[in-house]
Image: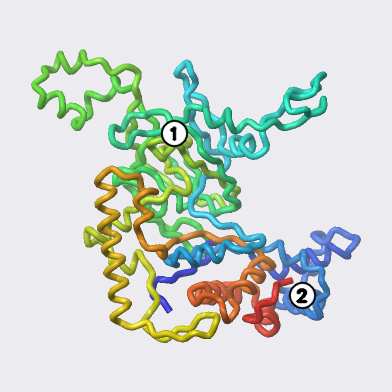
Amino acid sequence: MDRFFTVEVLSHTANPQQVIYAAMHQDYAESFVWSERDRFPSETQAGEIIIKHLLAGNRGHYGPLEHPQITLNCGFFPHSTMQQMRTHRVGVSFDVQCLAGDMEVTFLRASGSLWKIKISELCDLWMNGEQAICDRQNRGRNGEPPEHYRRDCKTRLKKLKLRVLNEETGIFEMGHIREVFDQGIQPVYRLTLEDGRTLDCTDKHRLLTSEGWQTMKESMSLIIDSHREVVSHKQDCYLMTNGVIVAERLYQDKNWLQEPLLAGLTSRQIASKPTGHKVKAHLMRVVQVKYLGLQRTYDLEVDGAWHNFVANGVVVHNSLRYTGKRIIDVVEGIRNVEEVFYLRPVGTYSDRQGKHYEYTEEQRQQDLDWCLMACKRYHDRIHQGFAEEHARGLIPFDVRQHWVLSANVRSLMHLLDLRWKLDAQLEIQELCSLMWKHFEAWVPHIAEWYSKNRAHKAKLAP
C-alpha cells in the first residue's frame, strides 16, 4: 500500500510453542516440568497439542499464551495509525527510546557537589514514593497508620537540580524532571567509551555526538544479525560526555578562544578572564558496542530550556521529546515530503456509512503542496525562536512515526482482533498484515488456528 511502511522483528522468545506447552503442562502436572524437558514434544508437536487441548473448543484457560513475547519495530506509519493502535490495547507496550535501569542520572546538590541515582531507583521513587520512617509512633502526615508505607515525593523530585547541557554554549546548567517513565522490556546494548565508562541503552535512544543528535544505531552505523548480536559498528563515533572545569581545558578550545582574540584581548587578559566553576562538555570516542539482551528500561522527560540529561556521564536526550529535523530537511531539499508525511494513494474510497468518493491525482498534489507549505511555515517559526512543541501545531496531522511494540501471543491476537477487521482504517489493516507475517513465522500452528477461526471477524481474542 505504501512503500515506506515497515515492520521488523527486534527479538522474540525462542521455541514459543514449547514454552506455551510447558505452561499448560505445569498447570496440571504435580511434578516440576523442567525436570521432564528431555521428554518435551517438538515445536511442531507442541503447536498441535496447544490447538487440540487449549484453543479448540474455546476452553477458556488462556494464561499460557501470555509467556512468549515478540518485539517489533514499526516504521513510517501515519500518526493516526499510532493513535488507533494505542486505543483499547491489552498487554501491549510501546516505546521509542530508553535507558537500562542501572544507568545513573546526575543531579547537583546545593553545595555544588554531584549526586547520582540509578534511573530504576528514581522511577521507583516517582511511581511508589519514598519509604516512610519505620515503626512510626504517631500517624503519618496524611493519616497513615504507624507501619511501613510509601509516601509520595514527586514534588520534591521535581525540585531536584538535574544536570543538563546548554547545547549552544557547551556548558552544563540545571534543569528539572517533568516525568519519569518505566518503558518496559527492550533490547539493550552497552557502549564502552575510551575512558572505560559505559552506557546501556536501546538502539533508538538519541545521543549527542560530534555530528549532533543521533539515535545510537545511527551514530554507530550499527549492523546486527537476526539474534540482535553486533556484526559491525562505526569506529570513530564520539559522544558528548560529562565535562571538565572550564579553566582546565577551555584555553585549548579554538572556538572559545576566537571571540576574545577577535575582540583584541591579549593572552594575559584572556587567561585572567573569570570563568567561575562552570563545567564544559567534551567528546569521548566509543570503542565497543555489545548486545546485553532484553532488560527493563526507563527514561525521563526534562522540564526547562534544554531537553537532555546526563546518564553514566554521557549526554542523552530525554524521552517523548519531539524534534522537527525531518520537517526542516524537507525545506532544505534533503528529504522528500512523502518520506515525512503520509497521504493515501489516488483511488476510490468509502467510509463506514457506505459513502463512496474519489481521491484524484489533482487533489493529492494539492495536499502535497499543503504539506510542503506547512514545512516552510514550521521552518520559519523555528528560526524565529519558537519551541518545537509550539511550531509542530502548524504541520499536518499524519506525520510519519516510528515505534517499538512488544506483545505476547495472547495480547497480539487481541490487537489483531481489534484492528485487523475489514472496516478498520486501511493503514492500520496494512500494519496488522505486516505484523501478521512475523506472527505466522513465529507461532505457525497458533497462527493457522487464528486465521481459520478469528482473523478479520472482529471477535476479541481469548
- How far apart marks 1 and 2 lie (CA) works out to 49 Å
Q: Would residue 36 be visible to someone looking at this image?
A: yes
Residue marked by disc 1: 313
Placement of the C terminus among the 4 image quadrants: bottom right
Image point 34% across, 44% down: which residue? 209
Q: Quadrant of residue 13?
A: bottom right
Placement of the N terminus among the 4 image quadrants: bottom left
Instruction: Assign a secondary structure to mark 1.
Output: loop
Image point 15% across, 29% down: which residue? 258
Amino acid at dot 1: Gly
Q: Quadrant of residue 247?
A: top left
Q: Would residue 442 be visible to someone looking at this image?
A: no
Instruction: Assign a secondary structure to mark 2.
Output: helix
Q: Seen in the image, is 87 located left or right of residue 226?
A: right
Residue marked by disc 2: 50
Q: Seen in the image, is 452 located left or right of residue 265?
A: right
Nearer-the-camera pick, 195 or 316: 316
N-term mark: 1 or 2: 2
Amino acid at dot 2: Ile
